[in-house]
Amino acid sequence: MKQTFADKVLAWFDVFGRHDLPWQQSLTPYPVWISEIMLQQTQVQTVIPYFDRFMARFPCVNALAEADLDEVLSLWTGLGYYARARNLHKTARIISEFHQGEFPRSQQDLVKLPGIGRSTAGAISAICFNERVAILDGNVKRVISRVFAIGGWPGQRDTAERLWGQAEAVLPHERINAYTQAMMDLGATVCVGKAPLCEACPVNEGCLALEQDSISDYPGRKPKVSKPTRRTIMLVVKTRAGEIRVAQRPPEGIWGGLYSFPELTPQALEALTPHLPSAPRALDTLKHSFTHFHLMIEPMLVEIDAIEDIPRIDHEAWLSEDNSEAFGLCRPAQKIIQSLLG
DNA sequence: AAAACGGGGTT
DNA sequence: AACCCAGTTTT
């Protein structure tokens, strides 16, 4: 009987896999869930101390549900991505209040919970409940795309569909929990992003990318899109006493709720200039990059004698040396203020 | 500077 | 369902 893909992966796991990680002690959903969420964003070695502290303080889902969000966040400090800690807390309350403290036992139901997507739901369900479902985290994406030479960027819908389909096609019928952990281990320790250890790989025979000597082509990279560059003018008003005017931005969108300088179009600046107490002076242009575009910011400085010399604007606030800590300033505003005050 | 990451939100 | 977004680390 020929060894299947899953057979080889499982045999490898029994010898070379990691079996002693803190969340592998009991394969119950609470610790598996916590570890999966932490591992989404951080490597195993970093996660371990956080996981241990977290479990010591919140040993079960009800303990987490009863906690204040602030305390959850404080135990999360240093892990980043705090929205996920909020989702963790939210989900604990849902499970505690609406599921009698019991986790849903299928991927289909787990995925309805905040912060749990298809892959994380699959991991919990496969590891804890032996449900025969696939996972597709970053590790598994690498393994599957290479062994089966599935090209294209995984962020692309059709590529993701082919990866999920292939991951499901090779699932074993037994030991689904061990297999799920095995695939994550294989991607994390052997089929790594750069310089994978193909000699040590249990599925190197028949790995299409290896046969074609094209490992580095998989997974396919995100097509690079040239980001557009936009420009904006920011009006910086400063008194001779050193007070600086900022304005709170709307709660939605770029820098939502943060303080910044009012943005102007060139036309608006032109129309405004005759009404200003003194001519605006251009400060150094600064560049700020977002995920989808670059922004060239042209700050224009207007110096005035006193706050009363300039009309009020909506949501304004005046920064001085004493109170500047009190405002959440967007990055570019911080830089401009720094250059202004030295 | 750009990619990777896995999930959320919106249309 | 298809699309785009945010926040952070890694490359």
Image (cartoon, coloured by chain):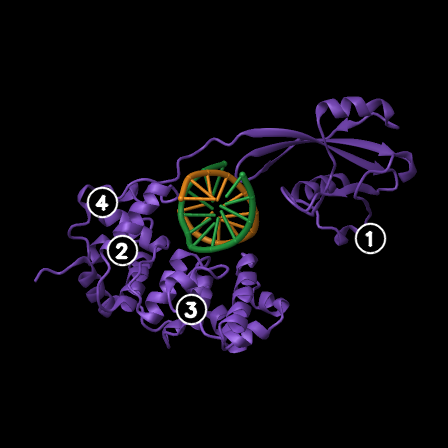
Chain colours: A purple, B green, C orange
Output the chain of dot 4: A
Which residue is drawn at the image coordinates 37% and 53% (left, top)? A138
Q: Nearer the viewer, residue A94 or A327?
A: A94
Q: Quadrant of residue A128?
A: bottom left
Q: Which quadrant holds the N terminus of chain A? A: bottom left
Q: Which residue does the numbered mark 3 point to in the structure image?
A: A104
Along the horizontal axis of the image, is A14 left or right of A41? left
Q: Which residue does the numbered mark 4 point to in the structure image?
A: A209
Name the residue type under label 2. Answer: Glu
Tell me if mark 3 has few (under 14), some (14-19) or many (20+) residues whose alpha carbon lies within 10 angstroms of its own: some
Lower sequence index among marks 4 and 2: 2
Output the chain of dot 1: A
* Labels 3 and 4 touching (C-beta < 8 A): no
Tell me residue A113's x, y (percent).
48, 62
What is the CA distance from the residue labelled 1 to the residue labelled 2? Answer: 60 Å
Residue A141 in view here:
yes
Residue A53 in view here:
no
Lower sequence index among marks 4 and 1: 4
What is the CA distance from the residue labelled 3 to the residue labelled 2? Answer: 21 Å
Lower sequence index among marks 1 and 3: 3
* Labels 4 and 2 touching (C-beta < 8 A): no
Name the residue type under label 3. Answer: Pro
Tell me residue A191's x, y (percent).
28, 54
Q: Which residue does the numbered mark 1 point to in the structure image?
A: A322
Output the chain of dot 2: A
Along the horizontal axis of the image, is A114 left or right of A8? right
SS at badge 2? helix
Please check whether the numbered discs 3 and 2 fall on a single chain.
yes
What is the CA distance from the residue labelled 3 to the residue labelled 4? Answer: 38 Å
Q: Which residue does the numbered mark 2 point to in the structure image?
A: A168
Give the number of the mark in front: 3 or 4: 3
